[in-house]
Amino acid sequence: MTGVGVLLLVLSTDNDSSSGSQPSPTALPASGGPATPRATTAATLASSATPISGSSSPAAPGDVRLFIWSRQQKQWLGSDLAKDDPGYREGDAVPFMIRIDNAVASVLYEVEISYWCHTSDGAAFDYLSNPSAEDSASQTTPPGPGRREDASIPIPDDSAISFDASGRRFKAWGGSFQQAPEGPSPDAPCQTDKRFSLSLMAQGGSMFLIWGGHLASKSDWGENQGASSQRSAIYTEVSVAQSSPQKLGVGPDAIAP
């Protein structure tokens, strides 16, 4: 692929006693109402669940959408294709966001996140993390939450990755974590994809979950084995309860060495 870099986005339709979910300080005012990004497709499912406080049963979701953050455009994208100069480098964590509108209060939402850890071209998203500090505007930019998170929980360590940073957390708005996330699975070196499962108790209305997909670096994996060596898009896929899976991909020209 030559010329202008491409950020390729394809949409296919916690609490333990030591380090569990933590409420955040008083929320900052929202920066305006949510806005719908260009060419966003929503997987809309009518909620038919009866609120069940404390139940671990999956809930029928409201309107579920997956977004990825464009550093160059400084906006959330959910479109099939967006042109972009290479905005990310190996070692950055690309922000992803699940937004669930019309969430049912006091109902648990079971979320699964799957990410391409390794392909035949080398390492891809080698672990999950916080979004990079350079992308802090992602929290306050519509259709994002527009304020400080309501809760956060540690992202479990990957025993096969010795260089993942400490202090990595999933962040939630409009909901709370009910137990520590499960994963990453499989508990083995990166070969294909890995998965996390987590449960969110909705407060009602809109609920958000934000995390970062860490772009593998050649300094960790070896020359020509980092994320910039990929020859095609690398993907993250999510599903919420009974909703259809959705996935977004980052094109290779959007990643610099």
Image (cartoon, rainbow, N blue to C red):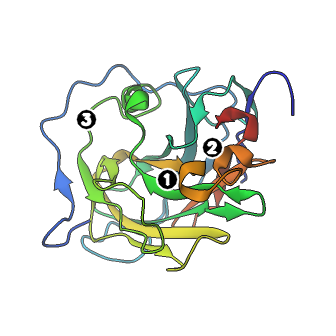
Which residue has dot 1 on it? 62
Q: Position of residue 161 (x, y in %)?
A: 46, 67
Nearer to us in this view, 79 or 70: 70
CA gap, disc 3 and disc 1: 23 Å
The residue at the point 34 percent across, 77 percent down is 56
Name the secondary structure under disc 3: loop
Nearer to us in this view, 59 or 238: 238
Q: Does label 1 or label 2 sit earlier along the sequence? A: 2
User: Contact, CB < 8 Å: mark 1 with mark 2?
Assistant: no
Q: Position of residue 124 (x, y in %)?
A: 64, 55
Left or right side of 224 for 194: left
Amino acid bearing label 2: Ala
Residue 108 makes an appearance in the image:
no
Which residue has dot 2 on it? 42
- Say few, some or many: other residues with alpha carbon within 10 Å of mark 1 (under 14 / 14 to 19 / 20 or more): many
Name the secondary structure under disc 2: loop
Which residue has dot 3 on it? 148
CA gap, disc 1 and disc 2: 10 Å
Amino acid bearing label 3: Arg
Q: Does label 3 or label 1 sit earlier along the sequence? A: 1
